[in-house]
Every structure is written in structure tokens, then in C-alpha cells.
Amino acid sequence: MNSFKTLFKLMFHYDIRDWSTLVFTFLFPIALLLALVLSFKSYVPGVDIASQISANVIAFGAAYVGIFAGASHLALWRENGMLQTVRNFPLSWNVIILSQAVVGIVVLLAQAVVLVVLGLIMGMVLKPTFLSGLLPLVLGYLLFFFLGVIIAMIIYSIAGVSILANIIILPLGFIGGAMMPLNMLPSWVQTIAPYTPLYHMREALSMMLIGLGTWPHAWLGILYLTVGCITLGLVSIYGFRWK
């Protein structure tokens, strides 16, 4: 427990002092939310587009935080030798990964609060079930966090990790309907969208946050995220231990 607390404080202090983490965690999703709402609001009169876009951006923001929390930090620590230094202490890989995951969840919750407040200012309407939206939000974050850890196992440079993470997360955000409404995308995108994690994360979050969709689709999304999270979690933990 003491090891976990020490690593948590170390990683948390690093995150809040790192300008790139703050930019991509807060400024980037805020700018994305503003741009999308202002762009599409006038094109879809009579539709609560602000609520839909806000829920989509919150889901995308959680996935973005997750994949970079899992990938960039571990890659940076390995590149500058800090990971080997930490391993000289009686610490397991599980504690190292868990510490970074929890730090990411704290950052994720702060990001979600900022985006929800901004969404409310721009017209988003929350449903009484909005707090249950934490479930798909955290599950989706963990799924992408473990995916990030796997990326860090494969790529040995921080630059390579950042490039690959962006190559993965940006197309998934587009295909999953987080950046544009699915009905405005090509038919082939709409066909493959239900197989992507961001689609299910967005579907579950939208239902719980703003009441958009159906509960069967929301619970299917929760199941998808849970299975994906457990699978990638086992691969990342055992893979990192083997490495």
C-alpha cells in the first residue's frame, strides 16, 4: 500500500506539471467540443445537438486520456531509465501499472467535470441517470489504458509511442461516431462502427448521460467494454511482466 501511494503521488505530480498532458487532457477536448457544437448546431435545427456532441466528446476524451496514460508515461520512464530505477525497489509490475491507471482515472474525472460544465453552458441536458455514466467512462478509459500499455511494450521510443497512439485513437474516434454523427458518415463506416470500442463507449455513455439511445444497446456496450478491458488488461499485465 505504501509503495502504491508513493508511486501515485510521483506520477500525479508529474502529470499536473507536464504541459503536454494538460494540453491534450483539457485544451484539446474543450476546443473539439466548442468547434463541433458551433459547427453543427446551425445545420440541425430543432435537434438537441449540443447534448449529443457533448456526450461524444466526453467519451472520446476518456479514450484519449486512457491510451496516452498507458503508453506515453511508461515509454518515457523506460526511455529515461526511470522504469529500471523503480524496478530496483521491491515493486511488482502490477503496482506500477495500477498506480498509473489510478492517476489517469483522477485526471479523467477532472476532464469529465470540465466538459460536462462546458456542455451544460452550451445547452446539454442531463438525465437523472447521468452519474451512472461513470461506469462506461471508467471502463472505456481502462480499455484504452491497457491498450496503451501494450503499445508501450511494442514501441521503445516515446515519439514512436505517441505516433502509434494517435494513429489508433483518431481513426477510432472518427469511425466510432465521436467526432461526427454516424448518419453523416459513409456507409462503410456505419457498417464497421459497431465493432469499435469507442462506438460502444459512446452508446452506453449517451444513454446514461443524456438519455439518447436504448438501454439494451447501453448494456451491450457495457458488456463489450468489460470483456475488452479484462482481455487487454490480462495481456498488458502478463506481457509487461514477461518483458
Image (cartoon, rainbow, N blue to C red):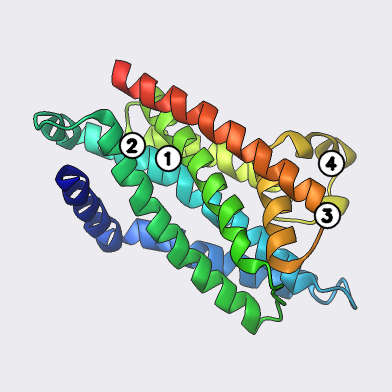
| Amino acid at dot 4 | Gln
Q: Nearer the viewer, mark 4 or mark 1?
A: 4
The image's mark for residue 214 is 3
Q: Nearer the viewer, mark 3 or mark 4?
A: 3
| Residue position marked by numbered label 4 in the rendering | 190
Q: Residue at the location (71% across, 75% down)?
A: 38
Rendered view: 58 above or below 11: below
| Amino acid at dot 3 | Thr
Q: Nearer the viewer, mark 4 or mark 2?
A: 4
* CA separation in Å, label 3 and label 4: 18 Å
Badge 1 marks a residue whose secondary structure is helix
Q: Does residue 175 show up?
A: no
Q: Earlier in the sequence, mark 3 or mark 1?
A: 1
Viewport quadrant of the N terminus? top left
Q: Would residue 60 be found to the left or right of residue 40 on screen? A: left
Q: Do the residues under discs 2 and 1 have CB atoms within 8 angstroms?
A: yes
Badge 4 marks a residue whose secondary structure is helix
Q: Earlier in the sequence, mark 2 or mark 3?
A: 2
The image's mark for residue 162 is 1
* CA separation in Å, label 2 and label 3: 41 Å
Q: Would residue 240 be found to the left or right of residue 231 on screen? A: left
